[in-house]
Image: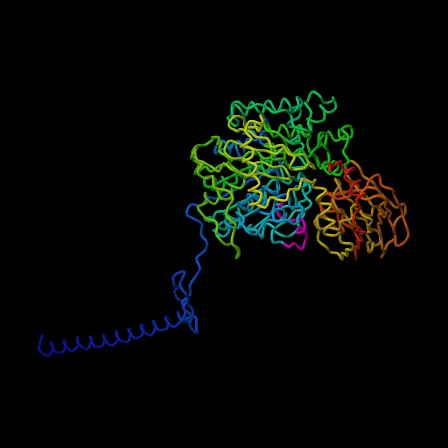
Amino acid sequence: MSDNDKKSGTRLDRRALLTGAAVGAAGAAAVATGANKVHDMQRKLATPAALPPGSAPEIGVSFADSHPVYEPAKAPPAGAPNIISIILDDVGFADLGCYGSEINTPNIDALAGGGLRYSNFRTTAMCSPTRASFLTGLNHHSAGMGWLADLDSGYPGYRGDLTHEAATIAEVLRDSGWSTLHIGKWHVNNVDTTGPTGPYVNWPTSRGFERAYWFQGHSTDNFRPGELYDGIAPVEAPDRPGYFAPDDLTDRAISYINTQKAAAPNKPFYLNIAYPTAHSPIQAIAEDRDAYKGKYNAGWDVIRAARLQRQLDMGIVPKNTKLPPISFGAKPWDELSDDEKHWYPRYMEVYAGAITRCDRNIGRLMAALEKLGVRDNTLVILFSDNGGSGEGTSTGTPNIFASAFGREVPVPEAMKFYDVLGGIETFPHYPMGWACASNTPFRLYKQYVHLGGIADPFVVNWPAKITEKGMVRDQFVHVVDLHPTLLDAAGIKRPEFHDGRRQKAFEGASIFPTFNTATAATRDEQYFELGGTRAYIKGKWRLVADHSRGEAYEDDHWELYDMSLESNELTDLSAQHPDIVTDLKQRWFDAAKRYNVLPLDDRNLLIKMAQYRQSRGVRPLWEFRPPVERISHDTAPAVGGFDHSIEIELTRPEGGGDGVLVASGSRYAGFVIYIDKGRLIYETSLTPWSERIMAQEELPFGKMTLRYVQTMTSRPFDGSGAIYLGDRKLAEHIFDRCNFATSYDGFSIGADEGNQVSTAYQGINRFQGTIDLVRVKIDARPTTILEETRFLKEIKIKI
């Protein structure tokens, strides 16, 4: 290559290099320009990087010049369990197979077999107080629930409304990252707040439960619930053949859980499912009831003895445990008549069938957890709220309202319900002798703080954590201990403040260490009080006041029992240890002052409620302009026992116009005004009795005003009624006995919602015309002393 060629090549190489460099510079400029455009676009569109949680956000004129700070999502501890609390109602200590019963409860028994049974678990002897204590971790008087949620007595311990000085277990878990779900019974909001305008501050969805499918009050009709709610909205139970409330509640629980796990698979849930089983009405599906046919013919004495023997074999009670004499209100089986021996077993067949159905539903719930793959890390607790109930009286009843209203159904009349007992035709409760069997081996019943009222089954199951499966724990546990126990198991602490309020300190203590340590210590001191009955335990000693309603408290004899010698209050040692009696009595009074137990009030619930209603005043005038939602029975017009009128302005269309105009309550206790085949009818019912006022002539079509007028001759049971078209009387009737209250199905206009009052029609029997106005007027003059005395005598209540 010549020098020129070399030079030329060099020049070419340099030119190429320079050209390439120029192109590269242009490309770089283009890249830089593109990068700037991207950066500009990012500034215009992209959210700037966040600063660490807890720092202050940087805020400029534009979002592009700012930096946000995000609050972290509430997250439970790693591995946090799902939690389910299952609450049974009025189920006694001995009513489950794993506690010595002959009743078939394989699914609950499986929970016990894979977990723990506690033999020394105690409640408050009544539903509302026990539930309030569980929800808050406070003693029931501290929680404002010294008695039922049915009235406010005007004292701190007896508001009948759940305190806001303690966050509920649902509120704490929700705020800690759990989904929270409530199903079934609630009964911790005062009756004055059960209406359509609330206030809702103590309804489930205001106390920590994000979703709730539930019913107001202390019980429900299992076939047609009358006061069912979805959140705060009143709903009718599904209208389908074979409907039964515990099945429906379980369906909803499974639906809630499946939905929650689909939407948030890594988020734990808390489900509180409170079955109506086996509170009155003791109702059962016929096949479940009849599966026990003949199994109780031997009577309650034989059943009690057999249950105790199984309890001894299981180690649920100490080996030296003996049966106490049968409690008051119940006779030895051999002293009953032939009719009673034939009839009374039927009640227990219904009761057993109800519990078996509930057990089957619990099995369905556990199977749903298995399908989701969450069963192992789900902590399940199951307990009853109090002992078996003696509220069915000595003879039992096919309708608890009849006996409560002082109109007991004679056994020969009651036996007419043999084939349908426990079905939709009845609202029954079993005789007190069967409650004695439910509470084996303890004395007395629900509402009493002797052990028959407060000793209950308590089962804990947590496959992933409990290692000593199938064991019995005999440490003392009170329902007030369960809230702190669940938080301890969940790995979280209750906040010192909630919704701006300083929280009362827990009055129970966690028993979580007992889950895997058989010797772990628990509290050994606790007071008890319900309706004037009182008790105190400290260590091995148990002090109980033998109190009779209406007697002076200072005259009560205090019984003393050494629970290390006898577990069921048989031998009173008070005479041998007066110093211990004195000490424990003083401890009870100290606790009573500390926890708002005073003043004591042993009056019957009906007396309290009647006086509470009178103290609030009965609203004398109501005007309803449909459409109007169902009104809860506690907040509906209180017409029972008073002079009153119900005026209805309506339009009947040509060729039709039948159906229900106004209904309140159900066939078990209620009244309805309806039109059938053109004739106006007023009907009142208290199963097995019903009375009817029926017009003989057909009503016209078009606009009209109809009236029902009730005139009392002696309040609240004696009076007459008349029905009118305008001012013209169509028919009248003197009642054998007026109803002074209704059942729990509420007050509805234009349809008979819940369980129907009359058997003359099927379903809600919606009115075919138009109702413009319903006006209810009540002569609510205060009752006199003479009327109150007559009332107490009629309903057979001891003053």
Taking the image as shown, residue 91 lies to the left or right of residue 744, namely: left
Q: Is residue 356 visible?
A: no
Q: Is residue 156 above or below residue 38?
A: above
What residue lies at 31% left-to-right and 74% top-to-bottom? 30
Q: How is the image coloured?
A: rainbow
In percent of width and height, residue 612 lies at: 71, 48
Main SS of the magenta part reads loop
Residue 193 magenta: yes
Magenta-drawn segment: 187-199
In percent of width and height, residue 313 lies at: 52, 23
In percent of width and height, residue 481 lies at: 51, 41
Residue 732 magenta: no
Q: Is residue 304 visible?
A: yes
Q: Is residue 338 above or below residue 686?
A: above
Q: Nearer the viewer, residue 332 or 584?
A: 584
Viewport quadrant of the C terminus: top right
Q: How many marks?
A: 0
Q: Nearer the viewer, residue 559 or 533?
A: 559
What residue lies at 28% left-to-right and 73% top-to-bottom? 28
Q: Nearer the viewer, residue 30 or 432?
A: 432
Which quarter of the figure has residue 407?
A: top right
Q: Nearer the viewer, residue 454 or 584?
A: 584
In percent of width and height, residue 206 lies at: 58, 53
Viewport quadrant of the N terminus: bottom left
Q: Is residue 260 above or below residue 453?
A: below
Q: Residue furthest front?
A: 579
